[in-house]
Every structure is written in structure tokens, then in C-alpha cells.
């Protein structure tokens, strides 16, 4: 139904935009397609396609080191998305509603900016001794867990991204909406829950996606904070580059890719339902 | 470029108050966090439990990525019922930073540093002594790879794999016979201008020039290094297309004609390219690096018995050929070359240089002049690939 | 404290509502006022503040401290018993400055390319894609990035190789008469960095354009504005926070990155982050590495500051032009 509408109003600009959208998607998926194709390489070195086969899949799945690192990475990425999204959303909402020139807003923006500007290696060098000091010397034992360390450090790394996206989302929003709700007797919690969150939702969702992605890719920081048994997937790959990547890496990447697509389909299904209702809320409020 | 002499090493070293990195970390706790640090901080390394002849149920191995045949690890697990967790690092420095900052609480048992880093690690007490009685397979080690300068008695380390540096070139583009590092420098300016690659390693890059000049590859002499700098910057760097860690990839891509290479990687590359007959590897004169990665046990290792048993398992002559085939480098035990011949391994001459070549190699060392090498490397990178 | 410091009174646009709500809050109970304070922006930012202070500032302060130290001997990465500023001029010598400007060129060009690619794409995503599919499309933007970056970059490497399949195909089809010569050039670096940072530009842009709302655009059409005018006068200004966010999110990390550039650019991709990592890793000179990192941070902030200044200037000029046009139109 929506389709019909767009078809009816299609102008040259629209067609151009659609073509552009498709070109960008091709650009984004091109290297992935190459990796998927090369995962069926029975040779010893990924980059050199010898003959077609499933050897890489078989030996990849049977390699405990690879499997445990993939699991570690996925756990850390989910954890990071949760932590960074909670803290980042609070930060983003706060910044969007800050009085102009409030010291805490300026300070927070600068600090978050600094987390982005700081080279990753500096974070890595500084994090490990800090975790040892806090976790071992001060006895904050949860910080001695490898997964917690990964999540805490990755969340620091992606918090700025979530915050800025959420703030950007709320920047153009009329605050009178909230004031009106307050006049109608809505409690602050209700105002937050029923107005801010639905409006910010796409930003929060985008932020969660970003922090998940950033965590899944983080290499340098992870390699410093990892604990025995918690080598994340990128660190494994980065370390294996020294000996030329084997096709197993592509095979497992392909499997992960398919899995994430499935997970995504599920999320999309859920979001379509909740997303619909949140749009309703916005519409009701806007009226 | 005008460069001021590097005088950092002449800086006064007040022995009295000099702080180790660990002490500095502890100090930071005191300075920065006042009251909290009052409740007693220790800079001592956590101790490892004593060896008691009972294998623990777990073992944490921290090593280079993809550096052991997974089947061998599985076999060890099945035979001894020890759960082996393998984690990977990409550089010695990563390993050292890890062990030093966690002060014996890293949880790792077996770690695999390169020989040149072992003196530094011993200085910081990051490694604990091996009990060679628990590693009976040590008797199978080739004397060429025991009793190295970094550990003359093998009290802390046993060779895990070794290799040397040389270069590989495409004979369709470079027709003359190449034998020395001087040939490498000449070809880089001639046939291979713009299609040369160097290793992504400051020590190895300056070694090209130092070797061609006939100096020690580990020289700390600033004038010698200055000469090497000008050769690298003026003759080699402008003709260099890329600095790549693994030459096999570079050879497959087909954009290079001359590549500085570790021997095992070159062998891997030659068994992958479509035209191996057009490639040639050289053990260049007068000398090159002899590097060695080593089995060691980290201070504070929670599972020392399993660690010894694991090292013993991994250097067993029975499985050496499987390990060699997987990682592409010999593991330093006697008779491996014969085994390789029997197993019909391809291109054995690339990973088993003759005794004559072995005798002229020079193992890399860490020296205060590494700072100069890093500077040379940075300048070279900035000057390449215009 | 007066209840004036409550959520809504922040922006200047509040007007009457603020006063009314103020009186409402005055009438509120104690718990109400407490809740108001807890949900006030300042209090709400507290967890984020605390997190960043404890897990970023505290550990990183240590590295800042290192930058005033020195490397005492080959076995020790840093000592700080004598503090000195000497590492800073030392860091600026050698290849640092020229490499920094090379890096700056890559990152500025990369940011601009990302913006040019992402702006129409995000516009399309936010406005032309049906709402039902929008979140799916958005997620699809992220999916390629769930494959590890080294693997992705290797995908590019395979594709751009002179002996690779793309090169062979193009030669076979007669599109090229010599092997593809992109790998290990600046072009390859630009392709790679734009690729790796594109989603960081698309997301904030999408979010901002989406937030600008269809109503305003429709109102603009109703008032007789054309498509171009609506885009320039309504959509683009509303998307500006997203443009700023996106540029920051791309430019800043790109300036410190080096892995993509090394893998695809070979020697042409030498970037400043590499120099710093070399000091920490290979040379084991943490004092010098820390000083270089500090200089990089400050220089990046300076560039961002200049960017903001230009933006502000641009807005003022645009604003003046706009008002001129508007009065013209009215008269």
C-alpha cells in the first residue's frame, strides 16, 4: 500500500534517490560478498582461491578457539549495547534538555568528545592497570571477570556515540510538548516514559546498533583488557594476520553474518509491532 | 632532514628514586586516590602454586594467533583431561604489557615470547623457572636452538619455533642472480622501484642497511645507525610500495616484485602463487635475523603442572611434523629436516637453511637504540608510497 | 533551590508554558519536587558523568602523567621520578608533523566523501523508504559491519588486487588493458576509510532527517515552496545537528585510525595513529607515545574547533542572506 503511493508520485529525483540508495547498499555489501565467496575456498590461504569446497566450514566449526572467541564477542557486544544504551540515552536526553551554557552539559560534551579523540592504544594502555588496581587491589571482584572488563571498556568507547545520536534526535523536538504534559499533571517519570522515550526511540535504537557494532569490531582495547578464556573474535583475527588468514576465518564470518541476519529478521519483526505503537504515541501527543 | 642527536639515554638516572613501571602505577594510586590507597597496596607479583605432580584440570595458553595445530591441542586435552583455553596476542609488547600490569594475576600459564624480549621479561620477573625434569622431551631439542644468549641455561625458555629473514623476488622482472642485502637495495632502486615491500618491523627494516654496510644488526652506534638511516630513507623508502607483515598475501596479490620476507611466510607464498617457478627466495649475505619464539611459563601461573606437561607435549618429536606443517616454521627439535623430507613437505630448503647460513645469522636483541630504529621506520614510512 | 531549574525551562523557546508549569510545580508535593529534580537534566546526566570519570578520566589521567616522564632504559617503558616537558618538542620532531598533515588530508577528504554519500542516502532512507521497511533498511546498513573489519578490509584487498578476480574480469572484458593498480594507493585508502566510517555518518543523518518530521515539509509544500526550496530551507537546517554529529563521529576516530589505511594503502597510508602505536609497542617508549597522543588529541580538537567556527560563520552568512531573500519575497 505504501508502495503504491510512492509509485504514484515518482519523479526523476525519487528515481535518482532510489538508485543511489541501491548503489550505496551494493557498496556496503560488496566486500562481504567477496568474503562469502572466498569462504568456500579449500586452500590454505584465504586470499588465494584454489578449489571449491566446505573444508573451511568443517574445520572452523570444530576449532574450539574460534568458536569460543566468537561467543565471547557476541556476549560482549550485547552487554555493551545494553550498558552503553542506558548510560548514553540518559546522557543524550539530559544534554538535549540542558539549559544553554549549563556547565555540566558543556563538561559532559567535552569529556565524551575526549573519549572519541583519544587513540585507542592510550585507552588500552591505561585500562589494564586500572582494572587491576580496582579489581584486584580494591577487591571489586566483578571487574576481574573477562567479560565484564570487555563490556565496561567497550561501553566507555561507544557511550559518546549513543549520547550524540540521541541528542541529535531530540535536538529539533519542541520542549513545549513536555511542558504541556506537565500542565496536564503527568509525573516526570511518565513524561520521560511517554514523551521523551518514544520520540528518542529511533535514536536509541540506532545508538544501540552502533554500540553493538563498535564492540563487535573493537580490537586494540580488547586485546589489552582480555582475560584468559575471553579472547574476542577480532583479537583472534588480528593476532592471526601474522600467519596469513586461513579460509576458516571467512567461513565463520559467513556463519556469523547469516546468524545476525536471522537475529535481525526477528528484531525487525518485533520492532514492527512496537514501532507501530510508538508512532501512535507520538501522533497522539502531537495532537 | 636536520636531526638532532638522540641524547635521551644520557639523561641523568638518579638511581635512588627511579621507579619501575609497576611502582609508578602503585604511586598513581597513592597520588590520585589518596585515602583509598591507604589500605595497603602491594607491588609484588602474585606467586604460582608449587608443582606437585598432579595435573590441574585447566590450562591457559596465551600465544600468537593461530600458532598451534588445533589437533595437537585437542590431543593434549583428550589424553590428560585438561581444558586448554587459548588466547591470542599480536605483538610481544601486548604480551609484556599484559603480564606486567596484571602483576601475576593475568591467569595465564604458558606464554610464547620472542627471544629478544626475554631479558626484559626476566628483568621484570614476568617468567618463572622451568623444571626441565617435567619436560623430558627437552632432550630432543637441536643444540642450534638451545642455550641462546637470552637464556643460556634454558632455565626459563624452550624454543617453540624459529625462522630467519631474507627476501623473495620475481625472476621474470629481476633476471640477475641476487645474493646479498646490497643486491636487495640495488634492485629496489632499479627493476623493483615502486614494487618493493618491506616488513612492518623497525628492527628488520634498518637491518637491511646495516647488513649491507657490514655492521652488526644490533648495533647501538649512532653513527652506524645514521648511515643506515640515510640508505633506508634515500635509497629504499622512496621505492617502497608497502610495509606488510605477511608476504604470502603480498605475493598472491601480484603487485610486488621484491619483498623482504620471513622464510616460512615466503615458502607459504610460493606454495600459493600460480607461478612458483618465477619466484626465488634468498638467504642474503652477510647476515640476517635469527628469531625464535619460546615456550615459557608466566609468573603466577595457576596451573604449573599442566603447563609443563603441555610444553612437553608440544615439543614431542612424534607430532613435530604436524606442528611444522600447520604453522610453517620448524620447531627446533633434532631430525625434523629428515622427517620433513620423508613426509615430502614442499620447499624444505626454505625453512631448513644450511648450517653455513645458520652460522652467519645474528639473533635480534632489544637495545636502547631501538628508539632510533623506530624513528628511522617512521621517517621511512612517511617517505614511501608517494 | 527554586523550581525554575526543572526539565522544561531550559531552552529559550519555552515562553508562557514555563511560567505556568512553574506555578504547577510550586503546588506540587515534596515527592513531586524530588521526582522533578531526579528527572531533571542535570541529575539525569549523573550516571554518564560518573561512568566517564571512573572508567575514562581516571585511567587515562595516568597516561597523561606519563607524557611528562621519560624512558630510563631499554627495559623500562616509562619513568616519572623526574617530570619534564621535553617529550613534547621531541614528539613534534621527525616525521610527526608531515604525517599529521597527511593524515588530516585523508580524514578531511574521508569525512567529506562520507557526507556526500550519506546525505542523499539518509534522506532516501528517512523519507522515501516506507516506514514499515525503514528500520530493516537501517539495520541493513549496519549488517556489513558485524563482519570483522579486518575481514572486510581483506575483502577489499582481494577485490582490488592486481591479480584479483575483479582485475582479471575487467581485463577480460576489455575495460582495462593492464592489471588494476589501486591497491596500495591513496585511492584504496580513501575507498577503505569511507567504507569503514560510512555508517557513522548515515545513522545520525538519518535520525536527524527523520526527526525533522513530514508535517513541516508538507506545510512547506502547502505554502507553495518547491522541492528544492523545501529541502534547502526545511530539511537541511533540521538535519544540521545530524550533519554535525556525523562529521564529528567520522572525522575524530578516523584521525586516530590507521589499520584500514595500512592494510589497503601500504606505504601510502601511513597515518599518525601508527606512529603513536609504534612508540607504545615497538619502541616501548610510553613517555614519548603519551606525548604524541596528547598532541594528536589537542590538534584534533583544534581542527574540530576550526570546523565549528566555519560552521558558525557560514550559518550567520546564510541567515543574513535568508532574511534578505525573505524580505524581498514579502515586498
Image: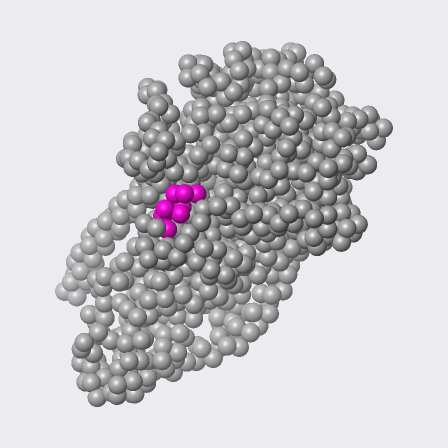
- Front residue (pair A119, A1): A119
Answer whether residue C115 is visible to the viewer in this image.
no
Position of residue A36 measured from the top left corner of the image (x, y, whole percent): 66, 50
Instruction: Name the quadrant of the C terminus of chain C.
Output: bottom left
* Residue appearing at x 60%, y 65% in the figure: A263
Position of residue B78 measured from the top left corner of the image (x, y, whole percent): 78, 52
Q: How many numbered tags mark residues here?
A: 0
How is this picture coloured?
one colour
Write down the quadrant of residue B224 in the picture.
top left
Instruction: Name the quadrant of the N terminus of chain C.
Output: bottom left
Position of residue A131 measured from the top left corner of the image (x, y, whole percent): 46, 54
User: Of helix, strand and loop, which mostly describes the magenta segment?
Assistant: helix
Write down the quadrant of residue A46 in the picture.
top right
* Residue appearing at x 42%, y 47% in the figure: A126
* Residue appearing at x 76%, y 47% in the figure: B76
Give above or below for B61 relative to B146: below
- Front residue (pair A157, B45): B45
- Front residue (pair A25, C282): C282
Give above or below for B236 relative to A140: above
The magenta stretch is B22-29
Position of residue A253 measured from the top left corner of the image (x, y, whole percent): 63, 52
Write down the quadrant of residue A216 in the picture.
bottom right
Residue ranking furthest to the left: C331
User: Does A277 lie within the magenta span?
Assistant: no
Give above or below for C194 relative to A180: above
* Residue appearing at x 40%, y 64% in the figure: A88
Amino acid at each position: 500500500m505504501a508502495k503504491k503511493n510512492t509509485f504514484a508520485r515518482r519523479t526523476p529525483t525519487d528515481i535518482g534517490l532510489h538508485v543511489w540508495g541501491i548503489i550505496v547498499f551494493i557498496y556496503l555489501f560488496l566486500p562481504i560478498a567477496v568474503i562469502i565467496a572466498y569462504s568456500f575456498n579449500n586452500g590454505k590461504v584465504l586470499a588465494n582461491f584454489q578449489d571449491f569446497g566446505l573444508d573451511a566450514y568443517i574445520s572452523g566449526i570444530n576449532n574450539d578457539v574460534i568458536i569460543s572467541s566468537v561467543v565471547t564477542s557476541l556476549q560482549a557486544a550485547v552487554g555493551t549495547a545494553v550498558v552503553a544504551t542506558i548510560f548514553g540515552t540518559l546522557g543524550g536526553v539530559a544534554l538535549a534538555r540542558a539549559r544553554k551554557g549549563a556547565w555540566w552539559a558543556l563538561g559532559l560534551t567535552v569529556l565524551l568528545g575526549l573519549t572519541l579523540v583519544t587513540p585507542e592504544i592510550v585507552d588500552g594502555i591505561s585500562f589494564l592497570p586500572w582494572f587491576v588496581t580496582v579489581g584486584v587491589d580494591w577487591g571489586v571482584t566483578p571487574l576481574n571477570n573477562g567479560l565484564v572488563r570487555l563490556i565496561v571498556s567497550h561501553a566507555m568507547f561507544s557511550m559518546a556515540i549513543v549520547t550524540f545520536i540521541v541528542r541529535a534526535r531530540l535536538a529539533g523536538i519542541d520542549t513545549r510538548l513536555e511542558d504541556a504534559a506537565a500542565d496536564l499533571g503527568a509525573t516526570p517519570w511518565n513524561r520521560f516514559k511517554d514523551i521523551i522515550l518514544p520520540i528518542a526511540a529511533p535514536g536509541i535504537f540506532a545508538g544501540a546498533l552502533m554500540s553493538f557494532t563498535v564492540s563487535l569490531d573493537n580490537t586494540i582495547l580488547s586485546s589489552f583488557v582480555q582475560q584468559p578464556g575471553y579472547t574476542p573474535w577480532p583479537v583472534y583475527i588480528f593476532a592471526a594476520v601474522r600467519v596469513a588468514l586461513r579460509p576458516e576465518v571467512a567461513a565463520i564470518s559467513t556463519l556469523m553474518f547469516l546468524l545476525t541476519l536471522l537475529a535481525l529478521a526477528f528484531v525487525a519483526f518485533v520492532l514492527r509491532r512496537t514501532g507501530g505503537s510508538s508512532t501512535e504515541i507520538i501522533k497522539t501527543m502531537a495532537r | 632532514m636536520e636531526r638532532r642527536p638522540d641524547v635521551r639515554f644520557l639523561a641523568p638516572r638518579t638511581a635512588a628514586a627511579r621507579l619501575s613501571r609497576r611502582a609508578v602505577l602503585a604511586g598513581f594510586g597513592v597520588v590520585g586516590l589518596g585515602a583509598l590507597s591507604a589500605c595497603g597496596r602491594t607491588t609484588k607479583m602474585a606467586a604460582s602454586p608449587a608443582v606437585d605432580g598432579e595435573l590441574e584440570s585447566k590450562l591457559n595458553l596465551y600465544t600468537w594467533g593461530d600458532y598451534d595445530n588445533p589437533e595437537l591441542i585437542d590431543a593434549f586435552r583428550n589424553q590428560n583431561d585438561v581444558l586448554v583455553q587459548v588466547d591470542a596476542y599480536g605483538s610481544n609488547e601486548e604480551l609484556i604489557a599484559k603480564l606486567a600490569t596484571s602483576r601475576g594475576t593475568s591467569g595465564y600459564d604458558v606464554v610464547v615470547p620472542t627471544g629478544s624480549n626475554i631479558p626484559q621479561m626476566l628483568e621484570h620477573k614476568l617468567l618463572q623457572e622451568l623444571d626441565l625434569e617435567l619436560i623430558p622431551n627437552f632432550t630432543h631439542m637441536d643444540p642450534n636452538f638451545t642455550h641462546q644468549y637470552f637464556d643460556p641455561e634454558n632455565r626459563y625458555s624452550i624454543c617453540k619455533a624459529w625462522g630467519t629473514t631474507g627476501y623473495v623476488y620475481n625472476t621474470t622482472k629481476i633476471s640477475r642472480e641476487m645474493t646479498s642485502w646490497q643486491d636487495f637495495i640495488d634492485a629496489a632502486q632499479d627493476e623493483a622501484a615502486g614494487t618493493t615491500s618491506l616488513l612492518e618491523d623497525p628492527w628488520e627494516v634498518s637491518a637491511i642497511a646495516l647488513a649491507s654496510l657490514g655492521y652488526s644488526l644490533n648495533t647501538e652506534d649512532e653513527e652506524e645507525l645514521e648511515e643506515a638511516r640515510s640508505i633506508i630513507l634515500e635509497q629504499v623508502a622512496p621505492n617502497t610500495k608497502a610495509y606488510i607483515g605477511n608476504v604470502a598475501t603480498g605475493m598472491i596479490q601480484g603487485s610486488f616484485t621484491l619483498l623482504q620476507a620471513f622464510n616460512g611466510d615466503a615458502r607459504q607464498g610460493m606454495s600459493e602463487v600460480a607461478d612458483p617457478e618465477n619466484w626465488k627466495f634468498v638467504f642474503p649475505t652477510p647476515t640476517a635475523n635469527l628469531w625464535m619464539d619460546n615456550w615459557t611459563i608466566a609468573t603466577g601461573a595457576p596451573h604449573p603442572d599442566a603447563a609443563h606437561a603441555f610444553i612437553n607435549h608440544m615439543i614431542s618429536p612424534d607430532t613435530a611434523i604436524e606442528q611444522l606443517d600447520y604453522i610453517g616454521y620448524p620447531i627446533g627439535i633434532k631430525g625434523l629436516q629428515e622427517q620433513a623430507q620423508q613426509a615430502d613437505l614442499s620447499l624444505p630448503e626454505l625453512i631448513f637453511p644450511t648450517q653455513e647460513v645458520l652460522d652467519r645469522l645474528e639473533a635480534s636483541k632489544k637495545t636502547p637504540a631501538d628508539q632510533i630504529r623506530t624513528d628511522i621506520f617512521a621517517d621511512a614510512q612517511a617517505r614511501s608510497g608517494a | 533551590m527554586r523550581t525554575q531549574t526543572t526539565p522544561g525551562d531550559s531552552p529559550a523557546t519555552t515562553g508562557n508554558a514555563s511560567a505556568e508549569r512553574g506555578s504547577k510545580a510550586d503546588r506540587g508535593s515534596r515527592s513531586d519536587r524530588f521526582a522533578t529534580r531526579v528527572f531533571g537534566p542535570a541529575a539525569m546526566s549523573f550516571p554518564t558523568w560518573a561512568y566517564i570519570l571512573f572508567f575514562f578520566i581516571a585511567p587515562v589521567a595516568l597516561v597523561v602523567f606519563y607524557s611528562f616522564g621519560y624512558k630510563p632504559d631499554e627495559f623500562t617503558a616509562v619513568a616519572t621520578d623526574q617530570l619534564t616537558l621535553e617529550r613534547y618538542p621531541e614528539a613534534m620532531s621527525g616525521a610527526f608533523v608531515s604525517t599529521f598533515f597527511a593524515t588530516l588530508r585523508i580524514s578531511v577528504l574521508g569525512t567529506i566523501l562520507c557526507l556526500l554519500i550519506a546525505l542523499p542516502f539518509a534522506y532516501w532512507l528517512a523519507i522515501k523508504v516506507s516506514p514499515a521497511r525503514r528500520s530493516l533498511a537501517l539495520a541493513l546498513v549496519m549488517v556489513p559491519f558485524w563482519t570483522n573489519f579486518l575481514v572486510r578490509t581483506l575483502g577489499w584487498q582481494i577485490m582490488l588486487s592486481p591479480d584479483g578476480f575483479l582485475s582479471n574480469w575487467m581485463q577480460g572484458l576489455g575495460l582495462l588493458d593492464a592489471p588494476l593498480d589501486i591497491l596500495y594507493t591513496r585511492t584504496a585508502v580513501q575507498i577503505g576509510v569511507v567504507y569503514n566510517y560510512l555508517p557513522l555518518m548515515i545513522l545520525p543523518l538519518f535520525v536527524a532527517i527523520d526527526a525533522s518530521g513530514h508535517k513541516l515539509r508538507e506545510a512547506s509544500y502547502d505554502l507553495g515552496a518547491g522541492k528544492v526550496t523545501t529541502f534547502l530551507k526545511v530539511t537541511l537546517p533540521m538535519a544540521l545537528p545530524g550533519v554535525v554529529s556525523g562529521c564529528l563521529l567520522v572525522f575524530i576516530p578516523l584521525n586516530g585510525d590507521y589499520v584500514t589505511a595500512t592494510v589497503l594503502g601500504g606505504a601510502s597510508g601511513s597515518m599518525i595513529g601508527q606512529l603513536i602505536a609504534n612508540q607504545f609497542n615497538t619502541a616501548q617508549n610510553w613517555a614519548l607515545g603519551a606525548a604524541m597522543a596528547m598532541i594528536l588529541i589537542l590538534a584534533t580538537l583544534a581542527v574540530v574547533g576550526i570546523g565549528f567556527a566555519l560552521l558558525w560563520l557560514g550559518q550567520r552568512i546564510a541567515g543574513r542572506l535568508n532574511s534578505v531573500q525573505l524580505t524581498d519575497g514579502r515586498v
